[in-house]
Amino acid sequence: MIKLYGGARSRASIVQLYLEELQVPYTFQLLDMKVGEHLQPEFLAINPFGKVPAIDDDGLIVWESGAIILYLAEKYDQLKTLPEKAIASQWILFANSTLANGLFLAEIRDKESPRLLSGLNKVLENQLYITGDLFTVSDVAIGTILGYAIMMLQMSYADYPAIDAYVKRISDRPAYKKAILGIS
Ligand SMILES: N[C@@H](CCC(=O)N[C@@H](CS)C(=O)NCC(=O)O)C(=O)O
């Protein structure tokens, strides 16, 4: 069974969200990061950088949330063609680098966020989810970054109605409620 390593309110929730969406059985190994459990030799043997999330899938160790959700998408047959894999990689890398930096790095936020959010709003004006009308792994990556920006930066998407509606749509999903909002 997949073992997910994470801390309270950590990016392990991104992986947990996708495991819940896929309805895959897993165990959650909660590390007490306040006392530095993630920096102890036992976890450094899992991720030498001492960062969560990481998974142990019957001996296969993978860390970095984007790599883990891509792995899960492939393992559970969610990406059937090379173009689907390319598009998923594109959105996951965009979410975890360009979008996360543009929203969370204070020094570039004013310059970057209007352009990033306008682009995303345009994409979402004509479809329910990031790659079309079906929820995919790309929504796990993009939806959680947009959601974290609300929780951590009090970000408002009032000027971007399609994003606003999208975030509400994503937040209504049972997996998001459980993994990100902590509501069962
Ligand atoms: N890009 C990584 C970021 C991992 C990361 O920074 N995780 C934080 C928790 S959200 C962490 O482990 N911090 C502990 C530390 O830096 O000591 C990912 O998405 O997995």
Image: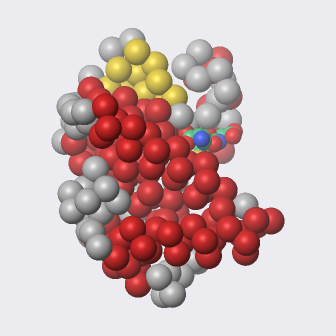
Q: In the image, what residue occupies the spot 27% across and 69% down?
A: 127
From the viewer's perspective, is residue 173 above or below residue 40?
below
Residue 12 can be seen in this image? no
Judging depth in this view, the residue of 108 and 169 nearest the camera is 108
Tally the marks.
0
Q: Position of residue 157 (x, y in %)?
A: 50, 81
110 on left or right of 83: right
Spot the residue most to the bottom. 158
Spot the residue most to the front. 83
From the viewer's perspective, is residue 122 above or below residue 97?
below
User: Which quarter of the picture shows residue 26?
Assistant: top left
Q: In the image, what residue occupies the spot 31% across and 56% down?
A: 131
Q: Position of residue 17 (x, y in %)?
A: 34, 49
Name the quadrant where ligand 1 sits: top right
Q: Position of residue 29 (x, y in %)?
A: 43, 33
Q: In the image, what residue occupies the spot 25% across and 33% down?
A: 81
Judging depth in this view, the residue of 179 and 157 nearest the camera is 157
